Image (spheres, rainbow, N blue to C red):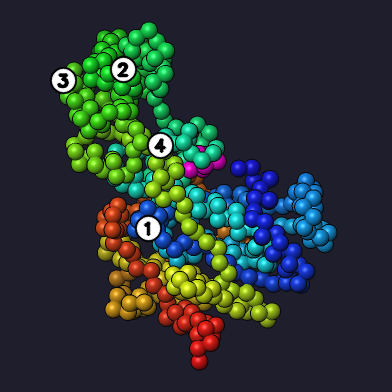
Amino acid sequence: MNFKTMSLMTDFYELTMMQGYLNDGSINKTVVFDVFYRVNPSGNGFAITAGLEQVIDYIKNLHFSESDIEYLRSLNTFDEKFLTYLKGFRFTGDIYAIPEGTVVFPTEPLLRVKAPIMEAQIVETAILTIINHQSLIATKASRVAWSAGNDAVMEFGLRRAQGPDAGIYGARAAIIGGCAGTSNVLTGKMFDVPVLGTHAHSWVMSFPSEVEAFRCYARTFPNACTFLVDTYDTLRSGVPNAIKVFKEMQEAGIELKNYGIRLDSGDLAYLSKEARKMLDAAGFTDAKITASSDLDEYLIMSLKLQGAKINNWGVGTKLITSDDCPSFGGVYKLSAESDGKGGFIPKIKLSDNPSKVTNPGIKKVLRFYSKDTGKIKADLICLEEEDYKETDTIHLFDHMAKWKNMILKPGTYTIRELLVPVFINGECVYTSPSVMDIKSNCEHELSTLWDEHRRLANPHTVPVDLSDKLFELKNRLIDELSGID
């Protein structure tokens, strides 16, 4: 993505609405939009938010070039008054967001935009495509990494991603979610993350024999020597030839480190166990066994349950595409508009589908942690002006099922406000951490969940409640718009 040329990366109706607002005289009306999602991807118990750094880059570079305006003029849809307005366009509003790598849950505002309506409208599509994609892949990566336990997971999906940008930023998100490194060299350069890889079957096939291919690779990379052993016959040829070359390296006085074999086909459980026996019998007990071949979190967990002797996992297609859940489902909804007197009028969207009824007003998200365990107790969505102190006794409950409740007593919990300022009056006030620092933050975030929240199927859910004040506001607006006295 070239953020200097992304201003037209928007849905057409954003621009037609903007012209309508301009002609209606609504140009200076300030509004508030929330970005949130309704359902965790892949049946997960949570999601991981990612992509904020790219949202920042987009907002900083948001402007309309002469060629952009000429193109819009050529559509014979927009009038000259609107096109003239676009010439001086820049974002002047406020954005608050939950930092990347944070564990999040459905209905919580991940990002909040407060800006003049023209500005708030145009940024919708780009923000959604960035946050939706990276949050999806980061969440998928966290599932894969959890299934691998203490083993390293390598992201190998570039050639199967839906285009270069999906490969680059998907790899970035995968690192945030828990991968140890990526095969994507450009991602490595752009974000200073580890790049990893071995060699292809074509390498072995290009030599007169498998053993000669291994010898050449060992001469070239003596300190990072992992052989792909399934080109011809894994157990009768590949592993024995790998052992032969490892012995030759030892005899030549080369210290063996970061070495081993990779399996890319066949019965990975059986082959890894047999290969482990062969490597151990030859004295190479510290040789690593890496596996690839259409892996996902379920197959990795199954292989581990079968006793597979695999140390590292290369996961490609099913991670970079989030194969079982190809979209995140984040939405961008109006929650308030200025009343012209310095205040804001809460707005709500109704629907025949109750899950699509939005939460009105300008909101914040509070997270409550147990002081004893450091684990998340619950999240609370409340109005911006509400004040909660750690010295309070707090009663949290699900307003749709009031018997689901908890009482937090003073001294037993801590509170963290999740949304932080990113842009104020159009100026960026937030410094994005490095990807590796975001990854470390994500590891800490995941440690605040219980294993029951992280299991792959039917996970336990963290309570996300509405404050009494927000719940009352929501129901009052529902009654007013439904004509209920």
| Above or below, comparing residue 192 to residue 87 in the picture | above
Magenta range is: 165-170
**Picture quadrant of residue 423:** bottom right
Q: Is the C-beta separation of discs 4 and 1 under 8 Å?
A: no
| Camera-side residue of 122 and 62 | 122
* Real-space CA distance between mark 3 and mark 4, rounded to the nearest whole angstrom: 32 Å
Q: Is residue 169 magenta?
A: yes
Label 2 to label 1: alpha-carbon separation: 43 Å
Q: Which residue is mark 2?
A: 232
Which residue lies under the disc numbered 4?
A: 316
- SS label for mark 4: loop
- At horizontal 72% and vertical 68% (from top left) the residue drawn is 21
Element marked by disc 2 = loop
Q: Earlier in the sequence, mark 3 or mark 1?
A: 1
What is the x, y in percent for residue 373? 27, 61
Comparing 61 with 10, the one in front is 10
Label 1 element class: loop
Residue drawn at (61%, 49%) of the image: 57
Q: Which residue is mark 1?
A: 46
Give the distance between the C-alpha atoms of the residues marked 3 and 1, in whole angstroms: 44 Å
Q: Does any portion of residue 384 appear in the rendered image?
A: no
Q: Which is more foreground, mark 2 or mark 1?
A: 2
**Would you name the residue on which mark 3 appears?**
281
